[in-house]
Amino acid sequence: MSSGNEKLNALPELPEEKLDEKAVYASEKEKEAASNDSEQNSLDAYDEDYDKPIFVNGEPVVRNGRDVSRYVVDVRDDGDQAVTFRSIVLGTVFGGLGAALYQIYTFKPVQEGISTVFLLLIIYSFGVAWATFLPRRAWVEGTRFAALGPVFEFINPGEFKLKEHVISVIAASTASYGSTSVLNFAVQRLYYDTNVHATTAVLSTFSTAVFGYGLVGILRPLTVYPSEMVYWGNLPTVSIFQALHFDSSDNHKRTRIFWIAFCGMFVYEIIPSYIFPFLNGFSIFCLSSQHARSGVQDAFTNIFGGSDGNEGLGLFSVSFDWQYIGSSYMSYPLIQQANSWIGYFFCYIAILGIYYSNTWNSKSFPMLSTSLFAANGSRYHQSAVFSGTDFHLNRTALAEVGLPALTGSNAWSNLTANLSIGGLIAHCIFFWGPYVVSSFKHARDKTQPDPHWQAMQKYKEAPWWWYLILIVLAFFAGLIAVLKGETTLPWWSYIVALLTGAFPFSTLLFARMGNGVATNQLFKMIAGAINPGRPVANLYFSMWSHDVVSTSIGLASDLKLGQYLKIPPRVLFLVQIWGTIIVVMVSIVTAQSEILTDPIGTNVWSGQTVQSLNSAAVTWSLAKELYGRDGPYFIIPMSLFIGAAVTFLQWLISRRWPKIGPVKVDTVMLPIIYMYSAWMSAGVNSPIWSGIIVGVVSQVWLRRYHPGWYRKYNYILGGAMDGGAQIMIFILSFAVFGASGVERPFPTWAGNPAQGNVDYCNGNGALD
């Protein structure tokens, strides 16, 4: 790390290659271990004491949030200006771009967030160009045009510095989180032939985003300030910010590596995503089944196929397409990834077991899909069952059409979602309850030990009542949308939705582990219970509950980014408010409507997200018939209580036996295991094993055995590859993939077959 001009606390400077005598955190025994040539000595002590650093060859091993605060993120603060005309313009323009990109990825077969690195890079390029080429005050000083100096100073304040850059990126990234409200509009257009009025769209989107932000502000002492609230996905972004703006020889090397990786991935990404899509799902099993009988081909497709949307589970398939792999596996802590691997293992067994045992009549439907089906396997005729201006249940039509059915994989996904939610709530209460209490005590006494929080105390904090005002404004904006718009949601149900979305359980998990548990399944259950027979109303209930949670996570992550990079809290407050209103809905819903309603989709576009929203809204509006005691899916709501009970049992075991063999009982994260136990229930699954390989290389080999390289280059390398891939995908989406309405497919060849799955798992004969 580069050292700052002036350290704002007592943390030692850590040289890049060797730990010096100022490593005051290390005991004499640890210093001896740091200089010892044997890596095993220090690794044997791994995790024995959470607060004591571990060294390998003089370099600290990054294990947890405290190590991140000490060794990964610099506390340097140059005190440069944050809000300028330039930063606001760049944040606004690229916020619209980020919101558009979010919509593109929403309708992709693999759901990816918009990399902040992508926004960071493009804003940096324009910011530097702005500073270089637009008139500056110095150009007119001492001339007859000197009166224009203040104007030029306002437009171009000079060098594009760190905080100005961060402000632009946070405004843009806040807009890029997207909103379930936008997805609701897509569902209404695709499945209910309803175009939502602009007033409803603006007010509902503003309401969900701003209400979530108000909650984030109130809960900052719990979800932002402590060291353990890392938001691991921020670390590539922080590394790149500091490399671009902190002038040192080490950062010059990091910057050079960054641009090499970025440019290389930008050029490379066009190959697997457009020219050679076979690279997204290389499977030796699929290639070997070209001349097998049809039954074997079908089984191989279900088990080993995975390069097309809802094709198969992708077992042992390897992807070389970075847009679907992503840098998250280079950022998530090892404990998260290890638990996810356990979940993957159960996912293969569960989905195949459910399908081939014909549980829930699974063989009548595709093995993987989020669509609704009739009992005979055809698409469910929901427009006949839900009619009228408010799309209320028509029981006469229901008796004729019959109940909708879920695929086995979709039912399993709903079941594990409830297991995860129950486990998450129980885990936060029993395992993390003491942490919650201590966090608020630290905030009250101003004793938070995190060095970055301490460095921020020179700035005025945004008062709590600012956030309370936001909550009030958001409440009334949403209430107007409910009373006057096309939501069909009763006002009292709207209030219940907001109350149920106000708990920060998923934010705690996301901050600590790198990703959270989707709590929308719980809110859909509540919606079905209080709004029976009203699918559109249930869509909006879920939005005002779950969207508050998801928006809170994104905004809390940006608050942590501001803490890491020393953005004044009041400035950050205003910028995030600005970013929440920059939301765009692009033309994909209209241009690709046929594909988006198809139960399978393609390897380029998929409607799995809107299909899943619609399926949940329809089925939970029939909660009594489908999920009641006599319904076919009664186990799904019951799994909420099962998940909580098992985690409570785990807590009791941990109290008696903190470690069982080499495993700490509290490191077994049941909510994560449950969630990943249905990870392959829809979409493209070929990147799973590539992600595991990336995670092992990064979090096991590099982090433990080459911690110096890991600390300096791991996050910046991942961010560079994300940025290069996403910029290319953005270009390709509008140029050739049909986001603009005109698709230009690459010519057919062996690496891009014209028919069948691109990984040849259906034996399409292209290799004969």
Image: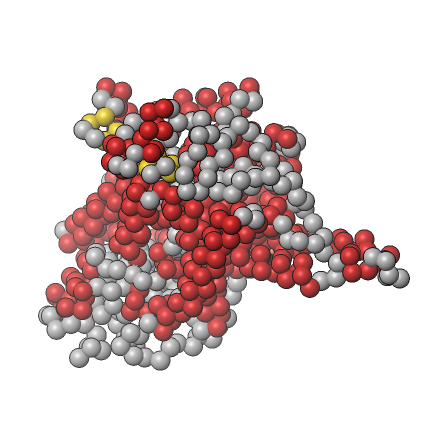
Q: Look at 26% across and 36% down and name the residue there.
A: 38
> Farthest residue toward the left?
293
Is 530 on the left or on the right of 313, as rendered?
Answer: right
Q: Residue 255: horizontal and vertical position, in percent?
A: 49, 54
Instruction: From this view, report whether residue 320 is shown above or below residue 20.
Output: below
Residue 312 seen in the figure:
no
Instruction: From this view, report whether residue 679 is shown above or below residue 425.
Output: below
Is 307 on the left or on the right of 593, as rendered?
Answer: left
Instruction: From this view, report whether residue 42 is shown above or below residue 123.
Output: above
The quarter of the picture where residue 46 lies is: top left
Front-most of residues 16 and 370: 16
Q: Residue 443: horizontal and vertical position, in percent?
A: 54, 24
Q: Residue 130: horizontal and vertical position, in percent?
A: 66, 60
Q: Look at 18% across and 48% down and name the residue there.
A: 349
Residue 736 seen in the figure:
yes
Q: Look at 61% across and 53% down and name the residue there.
A: 91
Q: Residue 462: horizontal and vertical position, in percent?
A: 63, 33
Instruction: Give the colour scheme of this rendering.
Output: secondary structure
Q: Look at 39% across and 60% down and name the residue there.
A: 323
- Count of number-bearing discs: 0
Front-most of residues 649 and 194: 649
Quadrant where the image shows the C terminus: bottom left
Front-most of residues 337 and 426: 337
